[in-house]
Amino acid sequence: MIQVSVENVDIAPGHAVEWTVVSPSSAGSADGTHQGGSTTYNQAKHFAVARSAREADDTVCAYVAGTFDLPGPVDQDALEAALLHLVRRHEVLRCTFRQLAGDVSCDAIAPKDVELKREDRGFIGSSAGVREYLHQAFQRIDPLSWPLIVMGAVLREDGATVWFACDHLVTDGLTTPVVVRDIATAYEAYATGRAPDLPEVGSYLEYSRRQRDRNASLHIDDPRLEHWKKFVADGGSFFPSFPLDIGVEQGRLYPAVNETEQLLDADRTRDLEAACRDAGGKLFMGLLGAVGVALRKEGGPDVYRGIMPVSERGDGRYEHTMGWFINTMPITFSVADGQDLPAVLRNVAAAWAEVRLHLDVPFVKAWELLAPVEYRTIRTWPYAVNFFSYLDFRRSPGAEHHLTRNARKHVWLARSNGFCFWLHRCDTGLYMNTIYAGTPRAQATKASLAATLGRTVGNLAQSGTF
């Protein structure tokens, strides 16, 4: 699976069909009147921001989507059954959200009370037309309206490209491969007259309730906040700033640019992994260290300061569950010149060990308790924030079929004031997907940083040196 803008992929022309999730009991969507279950802190913050933006007529469009291929000819009834199975299987897709006083709550519609409505969208005669159609279809997702997923397929005689898009409210980086696996597996079963055989999934509402219960009493003097407090004190800000110039004005959002490029092929990525292992660390530590070194080479500081998403799925049933199972944690380590790979890896390992001691503190709670008052209700980052993310899609559910299914993840944001990139590994190598504010300075910064990072990881793969 590769993470790339849908505007930059080739999908063959075909006949477009869509399926909409419907339910007689969904009338209480965003403005429902019946009190339901808990949301996670991430969901509550995201929903409140979306509502505030709507009231201010300042909505920022975004989506997380996926596409994959099925061999043909495709049985539309079996595909419809597979899509319905997905919605009935995952509780978070049946949740409707509403704003309460100071919080957000939700109801979960019963599996038997959801159905699909099929709509024929006609023939699309070019790859460019398919790209534009999908990009527009993905943008129909509205975090304040149910359903929070849109689904469809572009059908051809020799196969189909299946697609879906969600709001971040119900998804995270590892949800996309879960959805691809679930739909494809269920389709193959229904097309041959069998029932789908998939692993057990957990209740996202139960996960949310447990998170709330663990942190209901968290207060500003709680010892669990010491890691965050030290991070803020040492750096002078709750949000670590991206250390390179991207030419943005304070308080302004710019049209976002979305680009993906390969840093290493599969063989060189394995070499990099071996170099990190031989130096006493893991690949993600080497990549984090390489990012810090590349930033320094581009004029950044000797100390890397950033925030990073950390999965809370674990290896149990949540591994196969749709939802937003992510915490965001601060990390700091030295990348001073003159250090070799083992030294940088030791710095990263020590910093990561410290992070792991404090994973139970939700990012949103730390934000509410420790950020300056003027930052507690903002709708976007206050400035370009330094952010590191790495995913190995080869380890995700269904990864053994990603190449044959041509599985792709699509993340999109309409406007930005920052610079975010996601490193990801798949069967064909190591890639970087970047979304950044569309300024000339940001474009130049991105090109230079990508080249420096590519050389840095290439050097590590070849010789184990920066």
Image (spheres, rainbow, N blue to C red):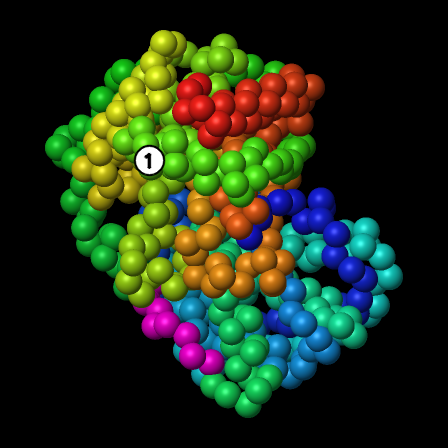
- Say few, some or many: other residues with alpha carbon within 10 Å of mark 1 (under 14 / 14 to 19 / 20 or more): some
Q: Which residues are magenta?
A: 196-205
Of 87 and 310, the residue lying toward us: 310
Q: Is residue 197 above or below residue 136?
A: below
Q: Is residue 378 visible?
A: no
Q: Is residue 275 above or below residue 136?
A: above
Q: Is residue 309 visible?
A: yes
**Residue ID for mark 1:** 277
Residue found at the far right of this picture: 125
Residue 465 image point, x, y percent = 42, 20
Asked if residue 315 lies left or right of residue 427, the reply is: left
* Main secondary structure found in the magenta portion: loop
Asked if residue 92 lies left or right of residue 131, the reply is: left
Q: Is residue 183 above or below residue 352?
A: below
Residue 398 image point, x, y percent = 47, 63
Residue found at the far front of this picture: 463
Kind of residue sitting beneath label 1? Arg
Residue at 52% across, 77% down = 186
Asked if residue 27 lies left or right of residue 204, the reply is: right
Which element type, helix, strand or loop, lies under badge 1?
helix
Residue 316 image point, x, y percent = 28, 62
Residue 198 in magenta stretch: yes
